[in-house]
Image (spheres, helix red, strand yellow):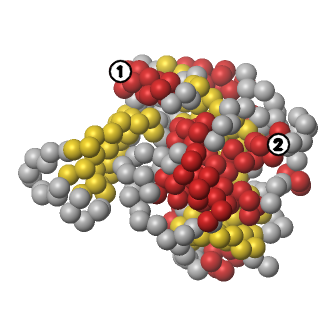
Protein backbone atom coordinates (compact mmCIF):
# COMPACT_ATOMS: atom_id res chain seq x y z
CA UNK A 1 0.00 0.00 0.00
CA UNK A 2 1.14 3.52 -0.84
CA UNK A 3 -0.12 6.42 1.28
CA UNK A 4 -0.23 10.04 0.18
CA UNK A 5 -0.51 13.28 2.14
CA UNK A 6 -1.73 16.50 0.56
CA UNK A 7 -1.77 19.22 3.25
CA UNK A 8 -3.49 21.74 0.98
CA UNK A 9 -5.67 19.97 -1.60
CA UNK A 10 -7.78 21.92 -4.07
CA UNK A 11 -10.85 21.27 -6.15
CA UNK A 12 -9.47 21.89 -9.63
CA UNK A 13 -11.92 23.72 -11.87
CA UNK A 14 -10.99 23.95 -15.53
CA UNK A 15 -12.44 25.34 -18.72
CA UNK A 16 -11.81 27.27 -21.91
CA UNK A 17 -12.57 30.77 -23.19
CA UNK A 18 -12.35 32.07 -26.74
CA UNK A 19 -10.16 34.93 -25.59
CA UNK A 20 -9.40 36.97 -22.47
CA UNK A 21 -10.16 40.69 -22.40
CA UNK A 22 -9.42 42.70 -19.21
CA UNK A 23 -12.49 44.13 -17.43
CA UNK A 24 -14.86 42.11 -19.64
CA UNK A 25 -16.96 39.13 -18.58
CA UNK A 26 -15.63 35.99 -20.23
CA UNK A 27 -17.90 32.95 -20.56
CA UNK A 28 -16.15 29.70 -19.69
CA UNK A 29 -16.97 26.55 -21.63
CA UNK A 30 -15.97 22.88 -21.36
CA UNK A 31 -16.07 22.94 -17.55
CA UNK A 32 -14.19 20.20 -15.70
CA UNK A 33 -13.98 19.40 -11.98
CA UNK A 34 -11.30 17.14 -10.54
CA UNK A 35 -9.83 16.49 -7.09
CA UNK A 36 -6.42 18.13 -7.11
CA UNK A 37 -3.24 18.84 -5.22
CA UNK A 38 0.19 17.31 -5.86
CA UNK A 39 -0.08 14.12 -3.83
CA UNK A 40 -3.80 13.69 -4.63
CA UNK A 41 -2.94 13.70 -8.33
CA UNK A 42 -0.12 11.26 -7.63
CA UNK A 43 -2.61 9.00 -5.82
CA UNK A 44 -4.97 9.10 -8.80
CA UNK A 45 -2.17 8.00 -11.13
CA UNK A 46 -1.04 5.30 -8.68
CA UNK A 47 -4.59 3.95 -8.54
CA UNK A 48 -4.83 4.05 -12.33
CA UNK A 49 -1.69 1.92 -12.56
CA UNK A 50 -3.31 -0.74 -10.41
CA UNK A 51 -1.33 -0.11 -7.22
CA UNK A 52 -3.22 0.13 -3.89
CA UNK A 53 -3.20 3.64 -2.45
CA UNK A 54 -4.87 5.66 0.31
CA UNK A 55 -4.96 9.44 0.00
CA UNK A 56 -4.95 11.67 3.08
CA UNK A 57 -4.57 15.28 4.14
CA UNK A 58 -7.07 17.94 5.21
CA UNK A 59 -10.57 18.50 3.79
CA UNK A 60 -13.47 20.67 4.91
CA UNK A 61 -16.78 22.26 3.95
CA UNK A 62 -18.96 21.66 0.92
CA UNK A 63 -15.95 21.65 -1.39
CA UNK A 64 -14.43 18.93 0.76
CA UNK A 65 -17.60 16.84 0.38
CA UNK A 66 -17.48 17.16 -3.41
CA UNK A 67 -13.77 16.32 -3.29
CA UNK A 68 -14.48 13.03 -1.52
CA UNK A 69 -17.26 12.23 -3.97
CA UNK A 70 -14.93 12.76 -6.93
CA UNK A 71 -12.25 10.54 -5.39
CA UNK A 72 -14.86 7.85 -4.76
CA UNK A 73 -15.93 8.10 -8.40
CA UNK A 74 -12.33 7.35 -9.42
CA UNK A 75 -12.16 4.55 -6.82
CA UNK A 76 -9.33 6.21 -4.94
CA UNK A 77 -9.44 5.18 -1.28
CA UNK A 78 -9.08 8.11 1.09
CA UNK A 79 -8.96 8.96 4.80
CA UNK A 80 -8.78 12.74 5.07
CA UNK A 81 -8.88 14.69 8.31
CA UNK A 82 -12.09 16.75 8.53
CA UNK A 83 -11.39 20.40 9.35
CA UNK A 84 -13.66 23.34 10.18
CA UNK A 85 -12.40 25.45 7.27
CA UNK A 86 -13.28 25.14 3.61
CA UNK A 87 -11.09 23.32 1.10
CA UNK A 88 -9.78 25.74 -1.51
CA UNK A 89 -10.56 25.95 -5.20
CA UNK A 90 -7.99 26.20 -7.98
CA UNK A 91 -8.94 27.57 -11.39
CA UNK A 92 -7.28 26.85 -14.74
CA UNK A 93 -8.66 28.57 -17.85
CA UNK A 94 -7.26 27.93 -21.32
CA UNK A 95 -7.36 30.79 -23.83
CA UNK A 96 -8.35 29.17 -27.13
CA UNK A 97 -6.97 32.06 -29.18
CA UNK A 98 -3.37 31.35 -28.18
CA UNK A 99 -3.41 28.14 -26.11
CA UNK A 100 -2.12 29.89 -23.00
CA UNK A 101 -3.41 29.01 -19.56
CA UNK A 102 -4.33 31.29 -16.68
CA UNK A 103 -4.08 29.62 -13.27
CA UNK A 104 -5.50 31.00 -10.04
CA UNK A 105 -4.66 29.27 -6.77
CA UNK A 106 -5.98 30.32 -3.35
CA UNK A 107 -4.01 30.00 -0.09
CA UNK A 108 -6.31 27.43 1.51
CA UNK A 109 -7.96 27.08 4.93
CA UNK A 110 -6.19 27.64 8.23
CA UNK A 111 -5.06 24.39 9.81
CA UNK A 112 -5.33 24.23 13.61
CA UNK A 113 -3.23 22.20 16.09
CA UNK A 114 -6.01 19.58 16.65
CA UNK A 115 -6.13 19.03 12.87
CA UNK A 116 -2.40 18.34 12.77
CA UNK A 117 -2.70 15.99 15.74
CA UNK A 118 -5.46 14.06 13.95
CA UNK A 119 -3.29 13.72 10.85
CA UNK A 120 -0.38 12.48 12.96
CA UNK A 121 -2.71 9.93 14.58
CA UNK A 122 -3.63 8.65 11.13
CA UNK A 123 0.03 8.42 10.13
CA UNK A 124 0.84 6.52 13.33
CA UNK A 125 -1.45 3.75 12.09
CA UNK A 126 0.39 3.34 8.79
CA UNK A 127 2.36 0.07 8.78
CA UNK A 128 6.12 0.30 9.20
CA UNK A 129 8.19 0.23 5.98
CA UNK A 130 5.34 1.64 3.88
CA UNK A 131 5.72 4.17 1.07
CA UNK A 132 4.45 7.68 1.74
CA UNK A 133 4.13 10.43 -0.88
CA UNK A 134 3.93 13.98 0.45
CA UNK A 135 3.22 16.78 -1.98
CA UNK A 136 1.98 20.28 -2.54
CA UNK A 137 1.99 23.62 -0.79
CA UNK A 138 1.52 24.09 2.95
CA UNK A 139 -1.72 25.75 4.09
CA UNK A 140 -1.84 28.53 6.71
CA UNK A 141 -1.14 27.10 10.16
CA UNK A 142 0.82 24.11 8.86
CA UNK A 143 4.47 25.05 9.12
CA UNK A 144 7.66 23.44 7.88
CA UNK A 145 8.37 22.32 11.47
CA UNK A 146 5.24 20.14 11.45
CA UNK A 147 6.21 18.77 8.06
CA UNK A 148 9.65 17.93 9.40
CA UNK A 149 8.19 16.13 12.40
CA UNK A 150 6.04 13.98 10.11
CA UNK A 151 9.01 13.03 7.92
CA UNK A 152 11.30 12.29 10.88
CA UNK A 153 8.69 10.13 12.62
CA UNK A 154 8.11 8.24 9.38
CA UNK A 155 11.83 7.70 8.90
CA UNK A 156 12.18 6.17 12.38
CA UNK A 157 9.66 3.52 11.35
CA UNK A 158 11.33 2.69 8.08
CA UNK A 159 8.68 4.50 6.03
CA UNK A 160 10.08 5.70 2.71
CA UNK A 161 9.12 9.29 1.90
CA UNK A 162 8.82 10.71 -1.61
CA UNK A 163 8.45 14.48 -1.39
CA UNK A 164 7.25 16.96 -4.01
CA UNK A 165 6.89 20.39 -2.43
CA UNK A 166 7.57 23.97 -3.63
CA UNK A 167 11.19 25.01 -3.96
CA UNK A 168 11.18 27.26 -0.90
CA UNK A 169 10.69 24.21 1.35
CA UNK A 170 13.19 21.87 -0.27
CA UNK A 171 16.32 22.91 1.63
CA UNK A 172 14.60 22.21 4.94
CA UNK A 173 13.18 18.94 3.58
CA UNK A 174 16.67 17.65 2.74
CA UNK A 175 17.59 17.82 6.42
CA UNK A 176 14.67 15.51 7.24
CA UNK A 177 16.02 12.71 5.04
CA UNK A 178 13.34 11.60 2.55
CA UNK A 179 14.01 8.87 -0.01
CA UNK A 180 13.40 11.10 -3.04
CA UNK A 181 12.49 14.62 -4.08
CA UNK A 182 11.03 15.66 -7.45
CA UNK A 183 11.65 19.36 -8.15
CA UNK A 184 11.28 20.95 -11.56
CA UNK A 185 14.29 22.88 -12.85
CA UNK A 186 13.23 26.21 -11.31
CA UNK A 187 12.65 24.60 -7.91
CA UNK A 188 15.96 22.76 -8.13
CA UNK A 189 17.80 25.99 -8.95
CA UNK A 190 16.26 27.51 -5.83
CA UNK A 191 17.35 24.51 -3.76
CA UNK A 192 20.88 24.39 -5.16
CA UNK A 193 21.20 28.19 -5.21
CA UNK A 194 22.40 27.88 -8.76
CA UNK A 195 21.40 29.15 -12.20
CA UNK A 196 22.44 25.87 -13.86
CA UNK A 197 20.17 24.84 -16.71
CA UNK A 198 22.31 22.64 -18.97
CA UNK A 199 22.05 18.92 -18.26
CA UNK A 200 25.73 18.56 -17.35
CA UNK A 201 25.64 21.50 -14.94
CA UNK A 202 22.36 20.44 -13.32
CA UNK A 203 23.76 16.92 -12.91
CA UNK A 204 26.85 18.27 -11.18
CA UNK A 205 24.72 20.23 -8.70
CA UNK A 206 22.44 17.24 -8.08
CA UNK A 207 25.37 14.90 -7.42
CA UNK A 208 26.55 17.32 -4.78
CA UNK A 209 23.23 16.85 -2.96
CA UNK A 210 23.05 13.05 -3.11
CA UNK A 211 25.08 12.84 0.09
CA UNK A 212 21.86 13.98 1.79
CA UNK A 213 19.25 12.18 -0.29
CA UNK A 214 19.38 8.88 -2.24
CA UNK A 215 17.33 9.92 -5.28
CA UNK A 216 16.60 13.21 -7.05
CA UNK A 217 14.36 13.48 -10.11
CA UNK A 218 14.49 16.86 -11.84
CA UNK A 219 11.96 17.66 -14.54
CA UNK A 220 12.04 20.30 -17.30
CA UNK A 221 15.76 19.93 -17.99
CA UNK A 222 16.51 20.68 -21.67
CA UNK A 223 13.23 19.16 -22.79
CA UNK A 224 13.53 16.09 -20.61
CA UNK A 225 14.27 14.98 -17.06
CA UNK A 226 17.23 13.86 -14.94
CA UNK A 227 17.23 11.01 -12.43
CA UNK A 228 20.23 11.07 -10.11
CA UNK A 229 21.32 8.62 -7.41
CA UNK A 230 24.51 8.38 -5.39
CA UNK A 231 26.04 5.98 -7.90
CA UNK A 232 24.53 6.80 -11.30
CA UNK A 233 22.45 9.19 -13.37
CA UNK A 234 20.05 8.99 -16.31
CA UNK A 235 18.58 11.50 -18.73
CA UNK A 236 15.22 10.87 -20.36
CA UNK A 237 13.15 12.51 -23.05
CA UNK A 238 9.84 11.64 -24.65
CA UNK A 239 8.69 11.90 -28.27
CA UNK A 240 7.43 15.18 -29.65
CA UNK A 241 3.82 15.79 -28.67
CA UNK A 242 1.23 18.52 -28.88
CA UNK A 243 0.88 19.78 -25.31
CA UNK A 244 -2.73 20.34 -24.31
CA UNK A 245 -2.05 21.28 -20.67
CA UNK A 246 0.89 21.14 -18.27
CA UNK A 247 -1.30 20.85 -15.16
CA UNK A 248 -0.52 17.70 -13.17
CA UNK A 249 2.36 16.48 -15.34
CA UNK A 250 4.89 16.60 -12.50
CA UNK A 251 2.41 15.01 -10.10
CA UNK A 252 1.84 12.21 -12.61
CA UNK A 253 5.59 11.64 -12.77
CA UNK A 254 5.73 11.30 -8.98
CA UNK A 255 2.79 8.90 -8.98
CA UNK A 256 4.27 6.60 -11.62
CA UNK A 257 7.72 6.51 -10.00
CA UNK A 258 6.12 5.76 -6.62
CA UNK A 259 4.09 2.93 -8.15
CA UNK A 260 7.21 1.46 -9.77
CA UNK A 261 9.12 1.63 -6.46
CA UNK A 262 6.24 -0.10 -4.66
CA UNK A 263 6.19 -2.91 -7.23
CA UNK A 264 9.94 -3.34 -6.80
CA UNK A 265 9.45 -3.60 -3.04
CA UNK A 266 6.82 -6.33 -3.46
CA UNK A 267 9.39 -8.53 -5.19
CA UNK A 268 11.58 -8.43 -2.07
CA UNK A 269 9.05 -10.57 -0.16
CA UNK A 270 8.19 -8.02 2.50
CA UNK A 271 11.80 -7.31 3.45
CA UNK A 272 12.44 -3.72 4.59
CA UNK A 273 13.29 -1.38 1.73
CA UNK A 274 17.03 -1.25 1.16
CA UNK A 275 18.39 1.92 -0.42
CA UNK A 276 21.54 0.09 -1.51
CA UNK A 277 19.44 -2.21 -3.72
CA UNK A 278 17.42 0.46 -5.50
CA UNK A 279 16.00 -0.52 -8.89
CA UNK A 280 17.48 0.82 -12.11
CA UNK A 281 16.86 4.56 -12.05
CA UNK A 282 16.39 4.52 -15.80
CA UNK A 283 13.32 2.30 -15.43
CA UNK A 284 11.86 4.61 -12.78
CA UNK A 285 12.50 7.64 -14.98
CA UNK A 286 10.91 5.92 -17.98
CA UNK A 287 7.70 5.29 -16.01
CA UNK A 288 7.72 8.84 -14.69
CA UNK A 289 8.14 10.42 -18.10
CA UNK A 290 5.51 8.14 -19.66
CA UNK A 291 3.00 9.32 -17.06
CA UNK A 292 3.96 12.97 -17.51
CA UNK A 293 3.57 12.70 -21.29
CA UNK A 294 0.17 11.04 -20.91
CA UNK A 295 -0.98 13.98 -18.80
CA UNK A 296 0.53 16.63 -21.07
CA UNK A 297 -1.69 15.56 -23.97
CA UNK A 298 -4.90 15.77 -21.91
CA UNK A 299 -6.82 19.07 -21.73
CA UNK A 300 -7.34 21.22 -18.65
CA UNK A 301 -6.74 19.54 -15.31
CA UNK A 302 -7.25 15.95 -16.46
CA UNK A 303 -4.55 13.33 -15.86
CA UNK A 304 -3.22 10.68 -18.22
CA UNK A 305 -4.81 7.25 -17.84
CA UNK A 306 -3.19 3.83 -17.63
CA UNK A 307 -3.68 3.05 -21.32
CA UNK A 308 -1.96 6.26 -22.39
CA UNK A 309 0.89 5.77 -19.90
CA UNK A 310 1.51 2.24 -21.16
CA UNK A 311 1.54 3.46 -24.77
CA UNK A 312 4.16 6.13 -24.03
CA UNK A 313 6.41 3.83 -21.96
CA UNK A 314 8.29 2.22 -24.89
CA UNK A 315 8.56 5.58 -26.69
CA UNK A 316 10.59 7.26 -23.93
CA UNK A 317 14.30 7.59 -24.66
CA UNK A 318 16.57 6.89 -21.66
CA UNK A 319 20.32 7.41 -21.63
CA UNK A 320 22.59 6.49 -18.76
CA UNK A 321 25.12 9.24 -18.15
CA UNK A 322 28.59 7.80 -17.76
In this view, the residue in front, 190 or 273, is 273
- Numbered mark located on residue 265 in the image: 2
Tell me the quarter of the picture where residue 47 sits: top right
Residue 314 visible? The answer is yes
- Residue at x 29% of width, y 62% of height: 99
Q: Name the element at disc 2.
A: helix
Task: Please say if 190 is above or below 152.
Answer: below
Q: Position of residue 265 (x, y in %)?
A: 82, 42
Residue sitting nearer the eye, 190 or 292: 292
Point out the image quarter for the C terminus: bottom right
Q: Would residue 67 appear left or right of 77 to someone viewing this image?
A: left
Mark 2, other Cα within 10 Å: few <14 / some 14–19 / many ≥20: many
Q: Quadrant of the N terminus?
A: top right
Please rate how many residues cluster around mark 1, counting C-alpha atoms within 10 Å: few if below 14, some from 14 to 19, many from 20: few
The answer to which of marks 1 and 2 sits earlier in the sequence is 1
> Residue 177 in the image: x percent, y percent?
74, 49
Residue 109 left/right relative to 78: left
Q: Tell me, for residue 54, which label it has, or none.
A: none
Measured as percent of width and height from the top left, residue 129 is found at 81, 35
Query: Which element type, helix, strand or loop, lies under badge 1?
Result: helix
Left/right placement of residue 72 relative to residue 218 reads left
Residue 127: image location, x then y, percent: 78, 27
Pick whichever, 308 or 58, lies toward us: 308
In this figure, which residue is indicated by the disc labeled 1? 62
Q: Is residue 190 left or right of residue 300?
A: right
Look at 50% across and 48% down and name the residue there.
304
- Tell me which residue sits at (61%, 46%) in the image: 255
Q: Nearer the viewer, residue 97 or 116?
A: 97
> On screen, 72 above or below 31?
above
Amino acid sequence: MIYTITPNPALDLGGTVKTIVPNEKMYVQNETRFPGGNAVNAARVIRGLGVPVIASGFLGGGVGEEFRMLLKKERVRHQFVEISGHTRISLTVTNESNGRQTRLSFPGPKIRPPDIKNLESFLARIPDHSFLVLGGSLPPGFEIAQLGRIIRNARRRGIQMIVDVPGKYLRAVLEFGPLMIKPNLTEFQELAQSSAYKTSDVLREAQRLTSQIPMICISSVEGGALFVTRDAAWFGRGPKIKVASTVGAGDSMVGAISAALWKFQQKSKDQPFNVSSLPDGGILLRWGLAAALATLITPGTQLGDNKSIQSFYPKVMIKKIE
